[in-house]
Image: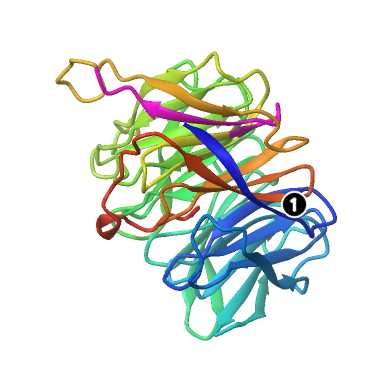
């Protein structure tokens, strides 16, 4: 199994922090955001082979921010694109037909906004910041967004937020080395932290940069400055069973010994079941679960192995890796070299999942 470079997408004038595939039908569309304060929209030629080098830049969005755009994410319907910026604001764009227009900017965070994520229904938006807080916004009619909760559980910069693929459970990753799990109170009045995944409970020992769920939401993978990936059992109902503050999400296994620099990004494909990582050593790695263990207990004997390593995937740090939400062999990456790359996975017997049953991937 190997990665073949399909096309290099150049145009940004600074490092590219993140990429996001647009959900829905039609030709593949990818958004990328950069230190050059812009978001670029790339589109694949309709009708062309998914692995063909026919990507073109359709738009440059530069209306929302005055500093670095750290992350961009499409809503589940593919009509709204949210952006998070170092200028302490969030931006919102709307796609109507072939046009994308800037429709809103909202404030609240007191420092750089690092990440933004939609829940599976598109009714809630989460953001996190260097100000140590996580905000939850409700999407209202008429392009209005109302903050419904400010979560202040982390002691340091919050690097990333993501939602469970089918439930309104929010997960955040931080410079304080922890992962926090948030859920709405039973009475619906506010949100609370139902669990903290951190050392010494077999958690990370340095900054947690990224988190990603698998297709069914019963497992989650995290990546860290401690050079490891950790896989977690997230199958339990941590909301109704955590009144005492101890929710039953559990560490399953640690993937270590493969990275020698900070792991900045991780993404669990909801189509092929593979885990991709991007790191400060300029490499992309792909991991798969070893399926020959004989244990019948869930999670027991679980292990993962690296199935490929793409050396010099970028000429500098790999900041983001994202699997295509429908095409099992397509992967996008972004790097400090200012370039977006489209890759095709070649060879291997991919463990394909059913597209029809896949929930929304907030980082697809």
Q: Position of residue 12 (x, y in %)?
A: 80, 58
Q: Residue at coordinates 45% horizontally, 28% vertically from top-left? A: 287
Tell which residue pokes out farthest to the left in this image.
Answer: 296
Q: Is residue 106 left or right of residue 223?
A: right
Asked which colour scheme the image uses, the reply is: rainbow
Is 163 within the magenta? Answer: no
**Of helix, strand and loop, which one carries label 1?**
loop
173 in relation to 109, above or below? above
- Which segment did they paint magenta? 278-292
Q: Residue at coordinates 43% horizontally, 55% vertically from top-left? A: 325
Is 288 within the magenta? Answer: yes
> Would you say residue 178 is visible in this rendering?
no
6 in relation to 148, above or below? above
Residue 264, image quadrant: top right
Q: In the image shown, does 142 or 194 lie closer to the viewer?
A: 142
> Would you say residue 247 is visible in this rendering?
yes
Q: Is residue 180 left or right of residue 135?
A: left
Q: In the image shown, does 155 or 11 lie closer to the viewer?
A: 11
Q: Residue at coordinates 70% horizontally, 65% vertically from top-left? A: 40
Numbered circles on residues, count: 1
Residue 242, image quadrant: top left
Q: Position of residue 274 (x, y in %)?
A: 41, 36
Q: Residue at coordinates 43% horizontally, 66% vertically from top-left? A: 76
Q: Is residue 85 left or right of residue 235?
A: right
Q: Residues within 10 Å of mark 1 (few under 14, many from 20)?
A: some
Q: Position of residue 296 (x, y in %)?
A: 14, 20
273 in relation to 305, above or below? below
Name the residue that disc number 1 marks.
111
Q: Position of residue 277 (x, y in %)?
A: 55, 34
């Amino acid at each position: 199994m190997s990665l073949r470079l399909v096309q290099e997408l150049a145009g940004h004038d600074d490092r590219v922090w993140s990429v996001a595939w647009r959900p829905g039908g039609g030709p593949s569309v990818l958004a990328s955001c950069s230190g050059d304060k812009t978001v670029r929209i790339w589109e694949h030629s309709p009708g062309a082979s998914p692995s063909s080098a026919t990507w073109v830049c359709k738009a440059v969005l530069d209306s929302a921010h005055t500093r670095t755009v750290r992350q961009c994410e499409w809503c589940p319907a593919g009509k709204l694109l949210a952006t998070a910026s170092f200028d302490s604001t969030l931006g919102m764009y709307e796609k109507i037909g072939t046009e994308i227009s800037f429709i809103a900017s909202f404030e609240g965070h007191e420092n750089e906004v690092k990440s933004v994520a939609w829940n599976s229904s598109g009714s809630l938006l989460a953001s996190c910041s260097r100000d140590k807080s996580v905000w939850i916004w409700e999407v209202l009619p008429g392009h209005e967004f109302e903050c419904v909760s400010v979560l202040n559980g982390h002691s340091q910069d919050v690097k990333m937020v993501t939602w469970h693929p089918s439930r309104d459970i929010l997960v955040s990753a931080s410079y304080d080395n922890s992962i926090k799990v948030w859920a709405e109170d039973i009475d619906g009045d506010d949100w609370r932290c139902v669990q903290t995944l951190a050392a010494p409970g077999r958690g990370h020992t340095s900054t947690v940069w990224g988190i990603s769920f698998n297709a069914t939401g019963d497992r989650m993978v995290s990546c860290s400055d401690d050079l490891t990936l950790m896989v977690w059992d997230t199958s339990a109902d941590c909301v109704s069973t955590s009144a005492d503050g101890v929710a039953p999400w559990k560490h399953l296994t640690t993937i270590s010994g493969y990275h020698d620099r900070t792991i900045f990004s991780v993404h669990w494909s909801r189509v092929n079941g593979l885990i991709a990582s991007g790191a400060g050593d300029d490499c992309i790695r792909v991991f798969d679960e070893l399926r020959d263990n004989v244990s019948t207990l869930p999670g027991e004997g679980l292990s993962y192995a690296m199935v490929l390593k793409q050396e010099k995937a970028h000429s500098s740090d790999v900041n983001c890796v994202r699997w295509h939400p429908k095409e099992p062999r397509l992967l996008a990456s972004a790097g400090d070299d200012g370039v977006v790359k489209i890759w095709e996975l070649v060879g291997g017997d991919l463990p394909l999942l059913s597209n029809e049953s896949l929930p929304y991937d907030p980082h697809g």
